[in-house]
Image (cartoon, rainbow, N blue to C red):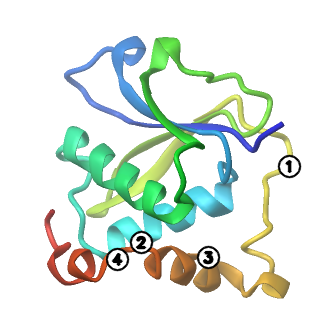
Amino acid sequence: MGNRAVIAIKDKYVEKENTPCIYLHWNGGRDSVQSYLDVHNELGMRGAEDPCYALARLTQIICNALGGELSCGINIYSRADTNNFDNGVYWLDNVDGKLSIVEREFAPEVEQTYWRDEKQGGSEAMKNSIIKCMPESYLQEGKNA
């Protein structure tokens, strides 16, 4: 049992079925995914105007946060576990210069809110826990990486 999700970035040059995506086995709830995006945007990583780099940087942030050797993979949409009975697919795009969730597929009726709950410290707590996992050099040199 996991907390699965697939994350993909809209790209007008790539058919939906061939779109590269991130597979998360854990931490795929909306609160976690939004926190990964918050860190991505706060550090000034490339956005949806360059989907290939944006997906790479987002993957790096997620893998730094999750650690270990499991829980995160790369696939194309047609081969990913999209209807995973957990969190489905998050489609990202550029909104006001930031990588943002713009669409969902196979989303649950009730969204996960663990980290957004004030008892867990709210959204800032999750974002700060992710930032602490980033290498110091990445924090200093991350702009437009």
Q: Residue at x 24, y 26 (%)?
A: 12
Of circles 1 and 3, the one toward us is 3
For the C terminus, give its image quadrant.
Answer: bottom left
The amino acid beneath tag 1 is Val
The amino acid type of the residue labelled 3 equals: Met
Asked if marks 3 and 4 touch (Cβ < 8 Å), the reply is no
Q: CA distance from mark 1 to mark 3?
A: 20 Å
* Mark-to-mark CA distance, 1 and 2: 24 Å
Q: Residues within 10 Å of mark 2 (few under 14, many from 20)?
A: many
Quadrant of residue 31 in the image? bottom right
Q: In the rendered image, which residue does mark 2 sit on? A: 39
Residue 99 is drawn in which quadrant?
Answer: bottom left
Task: Give the mark, 3 or 4, whose residue is nearer the N terminus.
Answer: 4
> In this figure, which residue is indicated by the disc labeled 1?
110
Upstream in sequence: badge 1 or badge 3: 1
Alpha carbons under labels 3 and 4: distance apart? 14 Å
**Residue bearing the label numbered 4:** 42
Element at badge 2?
Answer: helix
